[in-house]
Amino acid sequence: MNDVFLPDIAWLADVCDETPDTRTFRLRFRDSKKGEDFHFHPGQFLELSVFGYGEAPFCIASSPTRPEALETTVRRTGQLTDALHKLGEGDEVGARGPFGNGFNVEAAHGKDLLFVAGGIGLPPLRSLIWNVLDERSRFGNVTILYGARTPTDLVYKQELNEWGKRSDVETHVTVDASQPGWTGAVGVVPSLFKKAIFRPESTLAYVCGPPIMIRIAIQDLLALGFKEEAIISTLERMMQCGIGKCNHCAIGHRYVCRDGPVFNYGQIRELVE
Amino acid sequence: MAFTIEKKAVTRWLEKLLESGEMVAPVRTSCGDVVFSTIRSAEQVVWDFPNPLHPPKEFVLPQTDPIVKIRRNGQHHEVEAIHDGTRRFLFNARSCDAKGIAFLTRMHEMEPADASYLRRSGNLTVISLACATPCPLGFCICTDSGPFLSDSYDAQLTDLGESYLVEVGSAKGEVAVSEAQSLFRKATEDEVSQRNRLEVAARNHFGEETCHFASAMRRISTGRVPDALWEKMGDWCLECGGCNLVCPTCYCFSVKDLGRDGTWIRCRLRDSCQYAAFTLEASGHNPRAQRKDRMKRRFFHKVSAQYYTRDGTVGCVGCGRCIKVCLGTTHMPAVVAAIRKGKWHE
C-alpha cells in the first residue's frame, strides 16, 4: 500500500517570467529514476509542495513528448504561490502525481483541432499543443486562438510567435485592452472565431480559460455546429488531495481531480452541483 | 461466536488489554462530561453514559492528522511518511460509532487506498456496547447502525445483568478475547436468546417504524428539491461547521504544513463543506458561494442515491449529534423531513 500523500523531491531547473505575476517553473525529480518512470498525459496535473506551506494542484504545461523536465506555469495569487514564486533555480519542491484523466490524445488522431484559451488557461492546452505539434502528421488542421487582458498578460509570448510563423498551424492572438506597441487584434477570445474556418463535423475544440470565457466560447461553438462531445474543457475547482478523498472538488458524486479535470461539454452538462 | 464474561471479571480483561495496547474508552471528566479518551486504568471506563458529543473518529482520523515529516537540510529536503502503528482498543463505543468507523474505513480503502488511515484502523480493535435503551436523539434504526449491530464490530458487548455477552465479529475480536481466555466461557443458548430479546425491546423503543430517508433520497438524487427550500434552509444554517465536526462519517479535509525553521509536519486537517472557503478558488471564483449551495452539497453527499450506490449506505449513522450541535436546526432529521414534506418547519 502506497503512502499516497508522500511527495517526491524535485528541483527547479529553471524559472522564467511569463507576465508580471506569472512564472513557468521547470522541474526535475531529484531521483532520476523517478523522472524516467514518470509518465503522464496532457491535461493531467501535479500536486506541488512548497515545504512549510503545503501543497496545491497545478497542471503540467509541458508535453509528454518532451520528457526531460516537467513544466508548470503558476500565477502568484496566494500564500503558497507567493512562496513558490520566491524560489529560484536549484531550490527544491515536492511533487505528487500525475493526477486526473487528461486529454485523450489518441482519440484526436486524424481530427482537426481547435484550441481556444484565455489568460492562464493556455498552460494545460500548451501540453497538448506541443504533443500535437511534435506528432504533427497524426492530426488534421490545427488552429490556436488565444487571448489575455493585455499584451503584458499573454503567457508563452515567444512560443506564440513561433506558432504564428509555422505554416502548419493557424494562430490568432487577441487582447481585451491594447497597449503601446501592440499591433495585433483587440477583442475577447470568441471574437477570433470569425478569423478562422472550421469543419465542425471533424474538429475537436479544446476550451480553457476563465469561467465567463468558457461559457461564451461554448455557446459560440454550439452555434457554429460543434457537437457537445466535440467541445472539451478542463474544469477548475478548489482541490487539495488530488485523489478524490478530501471532497473539495466534488461536483455531485463526480470528482474533478479524479473523474476530470477534462470533460466534454455533454459530460459537463450532466454534472449536478 | 459468542462468549460470556462475568461483570466482576471485566476489569481484569481490560487490564490485560491495557498491557498489550492503548485503550480508548468513554470516561467522565472532572466537569462531568463524558468523552472518549485514552485511559490508564480499567476503573476509568464508564458503563452507563450518554454518548459523548465527539465521536471516537479522533482515534482513526485525528482533527490534526500528521501524515508526512519534512526536514530541511541545507538546500535539500527529506520527506518521510508518518506511520501510527499503535495498537489500540476502542472500548464501549456505541453501535453508531462502530458503524461510523467502519464507514470511514470503507472510504479510505477506496482506490487509491490511504495507507496512513488504514494503518491506524488496522491496528484498532473496536469493542462496542449494544444499546439496550436507545439515546433520546438517536435514529440509528433508520440508518441500519443500531441499536444492536450485526457487523462493523470486532467484539460486541451486551449487558445481561450479571454478565456481558461478547459476540466476536472478526479476527481482531478473537485476539482481544484470547488475551484473557480464562475469563470467558462459551455463551449458552439462553444467553444468546436473552440478547435477542433485548434487541427486540430496544428496537421497540423507537416510536416510529418508518424511515424517511428513502423519500428524501428520491428527491435529492433527481434534483427535485425546490431551490427555494434549499434557500430557506440555508437561511437557518449558521455555517458553524459543527455538524461536520461531530459527525462520525464526515471526513473532508485540507492539507497544511505545521512547524517552522525547516522542520514541518504535513497535516491533514478536518474541514467543513459548510464553510464558504471550502470551494473558494485562487481566482476568487466560488462555485458554492451561497449557503443553500453548500447545504445542498452536504445532503447530496450524505443522502443521494448516487453516493448510496458508491458507498453502500447513507452517510449517516443516526447518532443524533448534529441535532445536539446545530444552532440553526438544519440537522439531518429536520432537513430530511423538510425535503419529504416540501416545506421547512418554520
Image (cartoon, grey):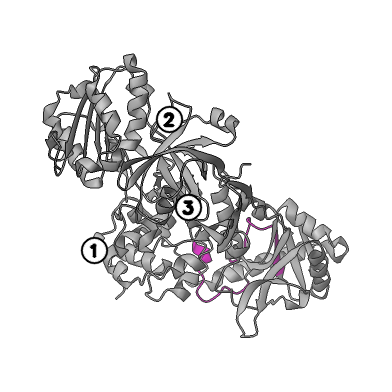
Residue B241 image-quadrant placement: bottom left
From the image, state whether disc 2 or disc 1 is nearer to you: 2
Magenta residue span: B132-158
Please check whether the numbered discs 2 and 1 fall on a single chain: no
Q: Position of residue B150 (x, y in %)?
A: 63, 57
Dominant SS of magenta comes to: loop
Mark 3 neighbour class, 10 Å CA radius: few under 14, some 14 to 19, many 20 or more:
many
* Residue A41, numbered label: 2
Pointer 2 local density, CA inside 10 Å: few below 14, some 14–19, many at least 20: many
Residue beneath the point at 36% across and 50% down: A76
Residue that mark 3 sits on: A246
- Whether the magenta-drawn stretch holds residue B152 is answered as yes
Q: Are marks 2 and 3 on the same chain?
A: yes
Whether labels 1 and 3 belong to a single chain: the reply is no
Q: Mark 1 or mark 3, which is nearer to you?
A: 3
Q: Can residue B194 be seen here?
A: no
**2 or 3: tag closer to the N-terminus:** 2
Looking at the image, can residue A92 be seen? yes
The three-letter amino acid code for the residue at tag 1 is: Ala
Q: Which is more toward the observer, B174 or B232?
A: B232
Q: Taking B98 as reference, is A87 above or below it?
A: above
Q: Position of residue A156 (x, y in %)?
A: 30, 34
Q: Kindly report the distance in space between the C-alpha atoms of the residues bearing marks 2 and 1.
A: 43 Å
Residue B190 versus residue B230: which sits nearer the camera? B230
Q: The numbered mark 2 sits on a residue in which chain?
A: A
- Percent x, y for residue B249? 52, 60
Q: Secondary structure at mark 2?
A: loop
Per the image, the residue denoted by label 1 is B228
Residue at disc 3, secondary structure: loop
In the image: residue A37, left or right of residue B21: left
Disc ID at residue A260: none
